Image (cartoon, rainbow, N blue to C red):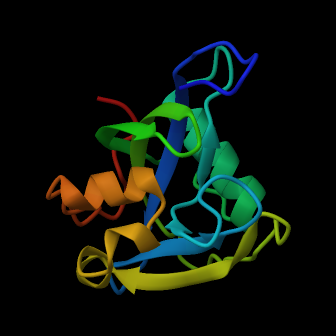
Amino acid sequence: MAAAGAPAQVRVGVGCIVIDEALRVLVGRRKGSHGAGKLALPGGHLELGESWHACAARELLEETGVAVGDDLAHVATTNDIMVAEGKHYVTVFMLARLPAGAVVHNLEPHKNHGWEWLTWEQLSVMPRDGLFIPLANLVTSGFIPPQPPASVPARG
């Protein structure tokens, strides 16, 4: 499944499910990478020695300018085999509440067409081929994001 000459490996991705006050989820349409044109959550690759919390907070800040610190909770994990791309990921999903007064910016326009807010119900009825595979797998699993409390417990 790996590209010619590339070692076969499973990578770890971290997706951040950001919920706003109206209980909508932040999604963006990917550009120029595997999954181009598909809706995805903010997120990226887990770096060596990095916690899931730190990765989700870093990626969210880099992509949107929103700082959540360590105010995140692990809510799901998916096994994402991307046959067409020759990739395999395990994706860890972290939940965060949009901080009061936070403004979402598209800080990586070369990777993302822009951010939008959708309800989980809207995502769940979309054709799965319009969602990035980790998000499609999460939706297909029947997962429903819990309503985050005013402060999401950082670590259990």
> In terms of depth relative to the viewer, which is nearer, 27 or 98?
27
Q: Is residue 83 left or right of residue 3?
A: left
Looking at the image, is 58 positioned above or below residue 62?
Answer: above
- Examine the image and state in which quarter residue 58 appears: top right
> In terms of depth relative to the viewer, which is nearer, 126 or 49?
126
Residue at left 35%, top 87%? 22
In the image, farthest residue toward the right: 110
Residue 127 seen: yes
Q: Position of residue 44 (x, y in %)?
A: 63, 44
Residue at left 50%, top 73%? 26
In the image, farthest residue toward the left: 142
Residue 69 seen: no
Q: How many marks?
A: 0
> In terms of depth relative to the viewer, which is nearer, 24 or 37?
37
Q: Position of residue 51 (x, y in %)?
A: 55, 25
Looking at the image, is 2 positioned above or below residue 135?
Answer: above
Residue at left 67%, top 12%? 7
Q: Position of residue 25 (x, y in %)?
A: 41, 74
Q: Position of residue 67 (x, y in %)?
A: 66, 58
Looking at the image, is 93 positioned above or below residue 5?
Answer: below
Quadrant in which the C terminus appears: top left
Q: Is residue 93 left or right of residue 14?
A: left
